[in-house]
Image (cartoon, rainbow, N blue to C red):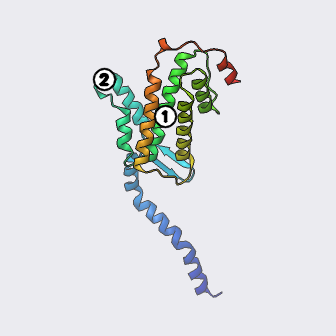
Amino acid sequence: MSWMEFTIALLDKLVWPAVLVFAVMSLKRPLAKLIPLAKKLKFKDLELEFGQGLKAVTQQAEGVFPELKTDNKTLLIASATHLPNSAIIEAWEQVDLTAERLIKSHCNNITLDKNTRYKHIENILISEQLINTKQGKLFSELRQLRNRVAHAVGYEVGKAEAIQYIELCFKLIEHLNSLTPSQLQVCDTQIEKAVS
């Protein structure tokens, strides 16, 4: 190999890294300005959730200024246009929080297993007759659809499907919220069996 061939081979190996370094350096500021505007950023195994801080601040502001309270369903339907997957994940989170709140108001001594949490919640809701078996099946299927959206790589949902999912979630939430503590009986021993 002559010195000219060596030089060309060396340049061939160094050009792409140099271009990449130049691109990163020149786009550093514009990208830094865009990142706070993003709700979710995912690169390989790195996933950043923006908006969690905003969500916490919004909840604090709603306590201070009651007129800031917003309808979660309306917000999620509006966000389904541009971020259908995120809207689905957030809608499921609302179902989960409502179900957990109901169970804790109904069963004082319950501890939900972290690994089988959703299945455990579903079993308690059905065994305590807070939901019937058809509603339990809906709970399970909504959870499975949410998992597909959250964990399947490249799985994208359309706007119409996201809105339909949100509507179903809020129907279930509405039912769970309609169950007041006075309508509920204290947990029986079946729940203790479901835990073990």
Give the image location of residue 196, x and y in percent: 71, 24
Inspect the image, locate mark 1, and give the three-letter code of the amino acid beneath it. Glu
**In the picture provided, is 172 more to the left or to the right than 188?**
left
Location of the N terminus (image quadrant): bottom right
Residue visible at 66% across and 19% down in the picture: 190
Give the image location of residue 111, x and y in percent: 62, 22
Q: State the residue in front, 23 or 50.
A: 50
Q: In the displayed structure, would residue 63 be above or below residue 136?
A: above
Q: How packed is label 2: few (under 14 Cα within 10 Å), some, or many (20 or more)?
A: few
Dot 1 lies on which element? helix
Is residue 190 among what the camera can see?
yes
Q: State the residue in front, 177 or 42.
A: 177
Inspect the image, locate mark 2, and give the three-letter code of the amino acid beneath it. Pro
Q: State the residue in front, 93 or 158.
A: 158
The disc placed on residue 66 is 2
The disc placed on residue 93 is 1
Q: How packed is label 1: few (under 14 Cα within 10 Å), some, or many (20 or more)?
A: some
